[in-house]
């Protein structure tokens, strides 16, 4: 049973670790790729989006990839 718990904790650590890195990218550049109006807002608005970006990073990453494919 402890092995299963260790695997789950390791998976969650990896998931949120990648999410944290994606949250930094989303704060700097990713939010403006999804919504052009965010470039005119203050940095505090982007900071409010970071916790959601950490939790939902796979969905947001797919949206950014699809948006870049459509724009090119």
Image (tube, rainbow, N blue to C red):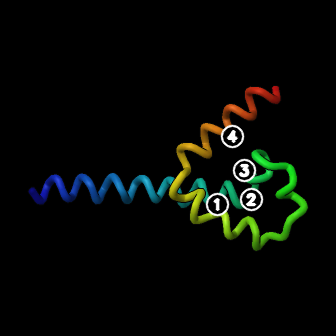
User: Local crowd at mark 4 within 10 Å, few (<14), some, or many (≥20)?
Assistant: some
Write the residue at 60% across / 37% down.
Answer: 62
Regarding mark 1 in the picture, which secondary structure is present there?
A: helix
Choose the circle earlier in sequence order: 1 or 3: 1
Q: Note whether 35 is above or below 69 in the view shown.
A: below
Residue identified by numbered label 4: 64
Q: Residue 17 vs residue 68: left or right? A: left
**Discs 4/1, front:** 4
Local crowd size for mark 2, using a 10 Å CA cut-off: few (<14), some (14–19), many (≥20)? few
Per the rendering, the mark at residue 30 is: 3
State yes or no: discs 2 and 1 in contact (Cβ < 8 Å).
Answer: yes
Q: Which residue is mark 2?
A: 28
Q: Residue at x 85, y 49 (%)?
A: 36
- How far, Cα to Cα, is label 4 from label 1? 15 Å
Give whichever of discs 3 and 4 has the lower sequence position.
3
Mark 4 or 1 closer to N-term? 1
Residue at x 40% of width, y 54% of height: 14
In the rendered image, the vertical position of residue 68 relative to residue 33, given as above or below: above
Q: Quote the CA–CA distance across marks 2 and 3.
A: 6 Å
């Amino acid at each position: 049973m402890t092995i299963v718990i260790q695997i789950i904790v390791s998976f969650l650590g990896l998931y949120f670790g990648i999410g944290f890195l994606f949250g930094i990218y989303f704060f700097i550049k990713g939010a403006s790729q999804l919504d052009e109006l965010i470039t005119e807002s203050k940095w505090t608005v982007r900071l409010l989006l970071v916790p959601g970006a950490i939790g939902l990073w796979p969905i947001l990453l797919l949206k950014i990839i699809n948006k870049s494919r459509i724009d090119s």
